[in-house]
Amino acid sequence: MSAGNESLDLLAEAGCPGCRTPFAMDLTMAFQPIVDVSDGSVFAYEALVRGLDGSGAGAVISQVTEENRFAFDQLCRRRAVEHAARLGVESKVSINFMPNAVYQPALCLGTTLAAARRHDFPIERIMFEVTEGERIEDRPHLKAILTEYKRQGFITAIDDFGAGHSGLNLLAEFQPDVIKLDMELVQGIATDQVRQAIVTAMVRLAGELGVALIAEGVETQAEFSVLKGAGVTLMQGYLFARPGFETLPAVDFDFTTPAGRADA
């Protein structure tokens, strides 16, 4: 049996037509922390797909086709939960999903729920990120997906906010638990007053909507300082830790010093 066949027969029998074509290669996960800079704790670990040989996401995703993307999406979910449980993740685990790979929201959650039960991982600590950069073919369908995920107790997030096809229109229709600012808004913010104004407005908007805001792609001390000054408390990026292949990397940042780095 190939790696992509796990549970697919049951899903296909239940009415998932896309689950009839398995994903031919197996895969694993790297993990990158999302840090609460107010106290230095880890808010969540994002699960990032990798090949078994350590190859990056691009090499794996290049194998995804229209026919096997449903099986790929399901396999990513299972592997993320399995590895998070094995590594003893005590915070949240964030899993990216492909909205165009979901036929029936409740049905497609079946393997995630089964993996969570099998590995005793609480579903309230699983965060699903929809990548706004993927073209959304049916926005009402995406809203139905996110609504069902929230109803079942999962945390919902919009990834790459500000870079995709829906933007504020999607936010007006559905308020997720979390918004992740696209790194294009973050990188260079230290010297860009327009980016600073946009992020400051997003902090205020998120606060009024009761949505948590994460800045991703933080790579410099200057970016960190400006973001923190704007009121952003959740951050992710190489400044804190690079993704760890099948491991939970330590946060390489000293929040007790003004410069951040322990050796500064």
Image (cartoon, grey):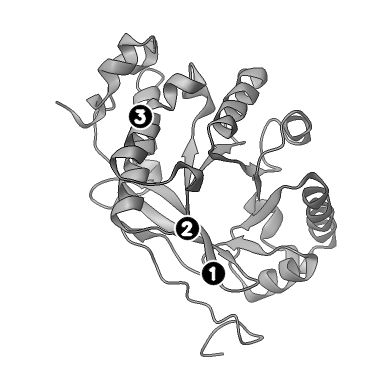
Instruction: Report, in whole angstroms, how far the alpha carbon at label 2 lies from the one at label 3.
Output: 21 Å
Give coordinates of residue 192: x percent, y percent: 80, 63
Q: In the picture, residue 239 is in which quadrant?
A: bottom right
Give coordinates of residue 143: x percent, y percent: 65, 25
**SS at mark 3?**
helix
Relative vertical location of residue 183 with respect to residue 5 in this rendering, above or below:
below
Foreground residue among 40 and 258: 40
Q: Residue 21: in sight, yes or no?
A: no
Q: Which residue is mark 3?
A: 111
Give coordinates of residue 32: x percent, y percent: 45, 59
Q: Identify the residue at image location x=74%, y=35%.
A: 171
Residue 137 shown left or right of residue 42 in the figure: right
The amino acid on which the numbered mark 2 sits, given as a three-letter code, is Ser
Mark 1 and 3 residues: CB-CB less than 8 Å, in contact? no
Mark 2 and 3 residues: CB-CB less than 8 Å, in contact? no
Q: Identify the residue at image location x=59%, y=80%.
A: 255
**SS at mark 1?**
strand
The amino acid on which the numbered mark 1 sits, given as a three-letter code, is Ser
Q: Which disc is residue 91 wearing?
A: 2
Mark 1 neighbour class, 10 Å CA radius: few under 14, some 14 to 19, many 20 or more: some
Give the farthest residue toward the left.
1
Q: Identify the residue at image location x=71%, y=74%.
A: 225
Give coordinates of residue 197: x percent, y percent: 85, 57
Q: Which disc is residue 41 wearing?
A: 1
Instruction: Report, in whole angstroms, how far the alpha carbon at label 2 lies from the one at label 1.
Output: 9 Å
Mark 2 and 1 residues: CB-CB less than 8 Å, in contact? yes
- Which image quadrant: the N terminus? top left
**SS at mark 2?**
loop
